[in-house]
């Protein structure tokens, strides 16, 4: 039985390229808000289903929100977000939970660097697909389901996007 893949990896996929183009038009603050909200509403419930008592992903989202509102500085948020990444490592063997925690950690990390928001798509869409189809589903089906989830992510970003944003994030995708 093949091992479950941990994330999407095709940077050239149409649904990833479309999302990236929209991301490039928005500010880091808008991207942070979008990624945090989407992770909270769609991805966090997946984590909580498997690890209801582990609050590290919730804490990461809370710290990112506090940074956005000016309540805390980045050095205060960063260790809390890193704990979410630790939760992902510890969820090895549960592809839904692991991908969920990685997506949440990347979403929260958008406050540090706007390009982290793409992690919502690469990890979060896979978490949703594994939850819906199971970890043993053929990769082509997982990827099709993930592509649909990326479409929902893009629609959610369009809903909060600032038209003619004057300060779009400068993103080096490094891909």
Image: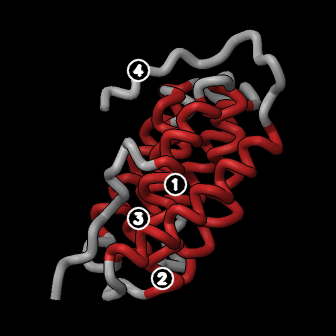
Element carrying mark 2:
helix
Most extreme residue toward the left, as rendered?
A: 1
Q: Which of marks 2 and 3 is in front?
A: 3
- Against 65, is 134 above or below? below
Residue 73 x %, y %: 59, 24
Q: Residue at label 1? A: 104
Foreground residue, 166 or 38? 166
Secondary structure, mark 4, is loop
What secondary structure is marked by label 1? Answer: helix
Marks 4 & 2, CB-CB < 8 Å contact: no
Dot placed on the residue nearer the N-terminal end, 4 or 2:
2
Give the residue pinned by disc 3. 99
According to the picture, the residue beneath numbered tag 4 turns out to be 172
How far apart in space, not on screen, are marks 4 and 2 (Cα)? 34 Å
Q: How far apart are marks 1 and 4 (CA)?
A: 21 Å
Q: Position of residue 2 (x, y in %)?
A: 17, 81
Which residue was labeled with disc 2? 50
When the figure is inspected, residue 12 is found, relative to residue 121, above or below; the finding is above
- Using the rendered view, name the quadrant where residue 65 is placed: top right
Distance in Å between CA atoms under marks 2 and 3: 12 Å
Is tag 2's residue or tag 3's residue first in the polypeptide sequence? 2
Residue 25 is labelled as: none
How many angstroms separate mark 1 from mark 2 (CA)?
15 Å
Q: Do the residues labelled 2 and 3 touch (CB within 8 Å)?
A: no
């Amino acid at each position: 039985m093949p091992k479950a893949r941990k994330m999407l990896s095709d940077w050239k996929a149409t649904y990833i390229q479309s999302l990236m183009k929209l991301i490039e038009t928005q500010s880091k603050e808008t991207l942070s808000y979008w990624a945090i909200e989407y992770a909270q509403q769609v991805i966090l419930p997946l984590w909580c289903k498997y690890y209801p008592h582990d609050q590290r992903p919730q804490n990461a989202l809370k710290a990112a929100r506090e940074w956005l509102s000016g309540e805390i500085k980045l050095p205060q948020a960063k260790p809390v977000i890193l704990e979410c990444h630790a939760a992902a490592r510890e969820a090895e063997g549960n592809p839904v939970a692991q991908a969920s925690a990685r997506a949440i950690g990347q979403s929260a990390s958008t406050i540090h660097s706007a390009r982290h928001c793409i992690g919502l798509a690469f990890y979060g869409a896979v978490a949703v697909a594994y939850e819906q189809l199971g970890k043993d589903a053929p990769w082509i089906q997982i990827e099709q389901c993930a592509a649909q989830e990326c479409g929902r992510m893009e629609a959610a970003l369009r809903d909060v996007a600032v038209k003619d944003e004057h300060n779009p994030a400068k993103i080096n995708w490094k891909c």
